[in-house]
Amino acid sequence: MMQHFPVLAVMLLFLSAFIVEIFGAKSKAVAQGIAMIAATVSAGLIYALIKPVMIDGQIISYWMGNWAPVEEYAIGIGYEVDALSLFFALLVVTTFWLSGLYSIGYMNKDHHLGHYYTLYLMLSGSVLGLVMTGDIFNLFVMVEIMTFASVALTAFRNFSEGALEGAFKYLVIGSMGSSFTLTGIALLYAECHTLNMAQIASILAGGLSPTAIAAFGLIIAGFGVKSYMVPFHTPAADAYTVAPTSISMIFSGMVNKAGVYGMIRMIYIVFRAMDKGTVQQMLAIFGAVTMFLGVTMALAQHEFKRLLAFHSISQIGYVITAVSLGSALGLTGGLFHAMNHTLFKGLLFLTAGAVLKQVGTTNLDKLGGLSKRMPHTTICFLVGAGAISGLPPFNGFASKWIIYQAIYTKAVESGKFVYVLCTICALVVSVMTLASFIKVTQAVFFGQLRKEHENVTEAPFSMRLPMYIMALLCTASGVFYDFVNKYLLHPAANAALNISKYIDAMMGPGYAANARVSDMSVEPVAFSYWNPIIWLVLFGVLFIGAALVILGGRNERGQILSSSDPSQAKYDTFFSGEKEMYSQVGGSDLFWGFKSNWKGYYKFMEAIHSGIVNDYASMAVVGTAVICLCMFLFMR
């Protein structure tokens, strides 16, 4: 019976989307009820797989229409759920269930909620289907549904400034990513004459031909678009900012994880390229650039959700760098941080949505002192900020520490200087992340309460409950790392590094052995808060962060800059300018001095983030060309 659960979970979401469109168009309560029932049952079906898959080590396979392999050749669409698939499926169902609950209070004044919940269910079903399918073309179909549902949800509040523009950018760049993926799949089908990922993995075990290398590069670029890896990150900031916050949470918690999952599945299982030094170094560089660009752009923002969007890009850089290392330690750290990013970034978006719902703005220059009126939201925000900044005992600290350790170990073992730079970059980005959230904390929640906000109240309980749950998970997954590692991380990492069971589950016993597919031994990754080096690094990071706070708002003469300084006008166009405000330390521009000292870098960032979709498309093409060129030059 359990083998039907993955398919039922996906079909239920898609079927419910059509039911909502038919029966929920004129009744908000009916639309909400159908959506939440579908989300709850679907999540229950996935959670029911934890014991057989994560604990007992089973792999669940299912052939649609009972089209099993004929003469050892796959001709049907198969669903295959191993520990890696289930790990991401758990993130997906948790995210969309909490988002649905949050939507009840957050979207209650919007119109056309039947359309909203239809798209919400289509998006949830597509991402869930993507992480559990065993067929690479079916994976592309899910990517397409995910992309167009995301575009429509980005533009859902089309009366908001920038909503249609953000949706158009998402459509153009997202469609380019889908085209890269489809072209790679077509080349792969021409090479292997099958679309089943388990069989493709066994066929490619003997080596990659030029056609397979081209397919690999295109597919990695396609999933790079979906994960918002630099230089494919450009639609993310607009989409995250203008979409309803309940959807911004899904984009951050589900959609970009679909891109990460696709990259892991391709690199570790389908193409078996994780032992290629070129692939490792190339993706490590892309990851480091992604984390650095994201955090520096976040420091420059004056809009709460846009700032969080750039931090999403930055944190995905950590994940890509970690999984690119090709080691059990790196993969464990990357998976853990992907999970943690879903939790703490989802929490932060929900707090931003609560502020927007109750106050009517997320402009940092128009906020301040909300801790006096929204104490529960403030506490939840501080938990999320501590987690993303890597402070103990929250989950972000544990996963970042494992990633630091993995990159440093790779640097020592390989002797490659690129990994030394990645280690330094990861530490610096962590400091800048902490500094950025100090800025948000003082601009939004602390300082003087503005007169127009004196009557602000807490968000409805239906919005706060998901925030409480995510804050609890951010803390519990950091404190109880051993439990998370034993039942989630270790099984998922083991599944990615040992693919013979994955192949045999779909193609029959002994198929992997005949293809000479080799596995790796994977030991659980130990972590302890009582390591003295951890505390030494922590205090060093806090010291640097404090220095950045003290010096960040000073000019070359050591004087605090006035928020009305006329020299700031030159930054108005790109950074929204600085205005006089209620706040004690320069308002949202706590680090104006830092931006002033880095004005050359920020002018370059202004040039490449022009807002012109043609420029963004060109960046995507160049990024894809670089990836494919590196594959051809160094993988053969």
Image (cartoon, rainbow, N blue to C red):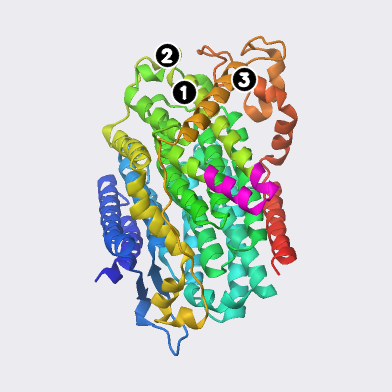
- Mark 2 falls on what kind of element? loop
Q: Which residue is mark 1?
A: 441
State which quadrant residue 467 falls in: top left
Q: Quadrant of the C terminus?
A: bottom right
- Rendered location of residue 547, percent (x, y): 59, 20
Task: Find the residue positioned furthest to the bottom.
Answer: 71
Q: Nearer the viewer, mark 3 or mark 2?
A: 3
User: Which callout, 3 or 2, points at the residue further toward the start of the chain?
Assistant: 2
Quadrant that contains the N terminus = bottom left
| Residue, disc 2 | 449
Give residue 531's quadrant in the image.
Answer: top left
Which span is picked out in magenta? 404-421
Find the distance from the CA under tag 3 to the CA under tag 2: 24 Å
Which residue is rendered at x = 59% and y = 49% of the image? Answer: 229
Percent x, y for residue 174?
57, 55
Q: Decide whether residue 104 is among the magenta residues.
A: no
Q: Secondary structure at mark 1?
A: helix
The amino acid beneath tag 2 is Leu
- Is 424 on the left-hand or right-hand side of 327? right
Residue to which mark 3 is pinned: 552
Q: In the picture shown, does residue 124 fall above or below 407?
A: below
Q: Nearer the viewer, residue 469 or 21?
A: 469
Which label sits in the foreground, 2 or 1?
1
Q: Tag 2: Cα neighbours inside 10 Å, few (<14), some, or many (≥20)? A: some
Magenta region, main secondary structure: helix
**Residue occupying the point 42% across, 11% down:** 451
Q: Is residue 86 above or below residue 421?
A: below
Q: Amino acid at mark 3?
A: Gly
Eye-nearest disc, 3 or 1: 3
